[in-house]
């Protein structure tokens, strides 16, 4: 009798859990479908193409760092190798007329990236600390040097290029337009992200977390830490190769920059910025960094300075990244105390934002004052044109910055106190609302 009465409850919980797991993927797929209709121009579609490729690369890197605890300083090598291999296949299709549709090309990049990761991982995954990090750095520098020497494969300093339109049409689509490439990249994004999520749910993915946290205990339980890291490394190389293949399709050129230490450093920054402790963290990091790199770079030459400052602030004050900052609010919503934070947030964050904008205005004015052409005294900042060599703009910017930051500092204790209250369950929450 009791089991039959509990059946509807269990059924509803299972349905709720299934909906909770499926909903993010449905929302993501719908967004990918409708975004080109919202941002209907080639420049926006190009930015989104770059963004989705970076998302795949960041998720693949997080498989290594976030799940396996392996810090790599040369992981762009596997994306670059997959991209170069796909570019050669693309050229073979053009030269010999191979009947190979373009949408399957990233799969070959993934297999080549996995094969190269298998080769390097055979001797690098015996440890996950400084030894692995230094080996990854050495391999990255070695391959970057080989890209200039082995011209037959890497094309030297000029790299190699191809033409995606010479491939076999896919249901009549020749991928002449960026929108067609966008939907191809979006398909591989959803497929790759879903496969990486499933991998994190497998025994190997679960054991990668255990090996990351306590390799000695995992070894004591009978699991080989080296083999767990090796399989995670291979899987990460596979999806890095997919990202490289999509890069080759989108840009139709690859150079040494696609596999050097600079690219490896950027993906490390992106992953930390988004949050290595969460599956969706690298997605947020890739979107934020791509917008900084593309949109903000059109407005200022100092975009890299602001990106570095954001990364530094994240590491110092929000080690969980942007995703961790969002997930900090989950208990607040669970306790139903989110309304308590609205007023303190407005009183603290708005002046803080104004203070940051004022400080950035001073930085831009200093940069223009020092580097502008001789006689060029006018500059445009926040849609306002003024003479940079007069005192009034400097006084206004400094006054706004100091005043806003002072208000922020004055209101910060109230926000901290309210934050602690919001994270404390009320009596009604503890009793479940029973009076």
Image (spheres, rainbow, N blue to C red):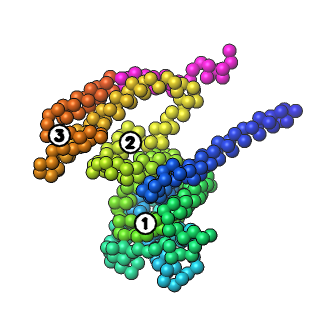
Front tag of 3 and 2: 3
The foreground one among 394 and 21 is: 394
Disc 2, SS: helix
Q: Nearer the viewer, residue 280 or 66?
A: 280
Q: Residue at x 43, y 66 (%)?
A: 251
How many numbered marks have been drawn onto this rendered protein structure? 3
Q: Are marks 3 and 2 in contact (CB under 8 Å)?
A: no
Instruction: Say which mark, if any, is on residue 305.
Output: none
Tell me the residue that label 3 is attached to. 387
Left or right of 67, for residue 21: right
Q: Earlier in the sequence, mark 3 or mark 1?
A: 1
Q: Position of residue 401 (x, y in %)?
A: 26, 31
What stretch of residues is rendered in magenta?
Answer: 411-435
Under circle 3, the secondary element is strand
Image quadrant occupied by the N terminus: top right
Please give left or right for residue 40 compared with residue 14 in the image: left
Crowding near the residue tagged with mark 2, few <14, some 14–19, many ≥20 C-alpha atoms within 10 Å: some
Q: Please tell me which residue lies in front, 46 or 237.
A: 46
305 shown above or below 116: above
Vertical order, 131 against 432 (above or below):
below
Most extreme residue toward the top is: 435
In the image, is residue 296 part of the stretch drawn in magenta? Answer: no
Task: Calculate the distance from the C-alpha at mark 2 to the C-alpha at mark 1.
Answer: 31 Å
Closest to the observer, 411 or 226: 411
The answer to which of marks 3 and 2 sits earlier in the sequence is: 2
Q: Which residue is mark 2?
A: 314
Report the residue marked by disc 1: 251
Per the image, label 1 sits on a secondary structure element best described as helix
Q: For the point 59% across and 55% down, which residue is it?
A: 194
Which residue is situated farthest in the right direction here? 1
State yes or no: discs 2 and 1 in contact (Cβ < 8 Å): no
């Amino acid at each position: 009798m009791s089991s039959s009465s509990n059946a509807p409850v269990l059924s509803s919980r299972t349905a709720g859990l299934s909906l909770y797991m499926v909903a993010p993927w449905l929302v993501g797929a719908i967004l990918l479908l409708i975004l080109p209709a919202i941002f209907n121009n080639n420049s926006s579609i190009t930015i989104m193409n770059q963004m989705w490729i970076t998302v795949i690369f960041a998720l693949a890197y997080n498989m290594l760092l976030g799940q396996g605890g392996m810090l790599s300083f040369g992981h762009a090598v596997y994306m670059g190798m997959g991209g170069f291999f796909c570019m050669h296949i693309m050229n073979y299709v053009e030269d010999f007329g191979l009947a190979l549709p373009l949408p399957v090309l990233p799969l070959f990049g993934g297999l080549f990236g996995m094969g190269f990761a298998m080769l390097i991982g055979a001797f690098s995954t015996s440890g996950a600390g400084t030894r692995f990090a230094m080996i990854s750095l050495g391999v990255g520098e070695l391959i970057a040097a080989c890209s200039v020497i082995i011209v037959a494969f890497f094309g030297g300093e000029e790299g190699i290029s191809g033409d995606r339109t010479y491939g076999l049409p896919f249901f009549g689509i020749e991928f002449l337009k960026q929108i067609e490439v966008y939907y191809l990249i979006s398909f591989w994004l959803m497929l790759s992200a879903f496969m990486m999520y499933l991998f994190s749910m497998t025994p190997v993915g679960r054991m990668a977390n255990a090996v990351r946290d306590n390799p000695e205990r995992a070894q004591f339980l009978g699991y080989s830490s080296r083999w767990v890291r090796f399989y995670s490394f291979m899987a990460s190389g596979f999806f890095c190769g997919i990202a490289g293949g999509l890069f080759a399709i989108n840009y139709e050129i690859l150079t040494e920059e696609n596999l050097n230490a600079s690219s490896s450093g950027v993906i490390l920054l992106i992953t930390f910025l988004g949050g290595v402790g969460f599956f969706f963290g690298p997605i947020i990091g890739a979107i934020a960094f791509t917008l900084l790199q593309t949109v903000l770079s059109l407005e200022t030459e100092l975009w890299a300075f602001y990106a570095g400052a954001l990364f530094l602030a994240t590491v110092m004050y929000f080690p969980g990244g942007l995703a961790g900052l969002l997930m900090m609010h989950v208990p607040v919503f669970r306790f139903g105390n989110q309304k308590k934070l609205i007023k303190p947030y407005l009183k603290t964050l708005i002046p803080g934002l104004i203070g940051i904008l004022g400080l950035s205005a001073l930085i831009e004015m200093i940069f223009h004052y020092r580097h502008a052409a001789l006689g060029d005294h006018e500059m445009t900042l926040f849609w306002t044109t003024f003479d940079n060599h007069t005192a009034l703009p400097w006084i206004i910017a400094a006054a706004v910055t100091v005043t806003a930051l002072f208000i922020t500092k004055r209101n910060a204790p109230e926000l901290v106190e309210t934050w602690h209250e919001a994270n404390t369950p009320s009596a009604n929450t503890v009793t479940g609302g029973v009076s």
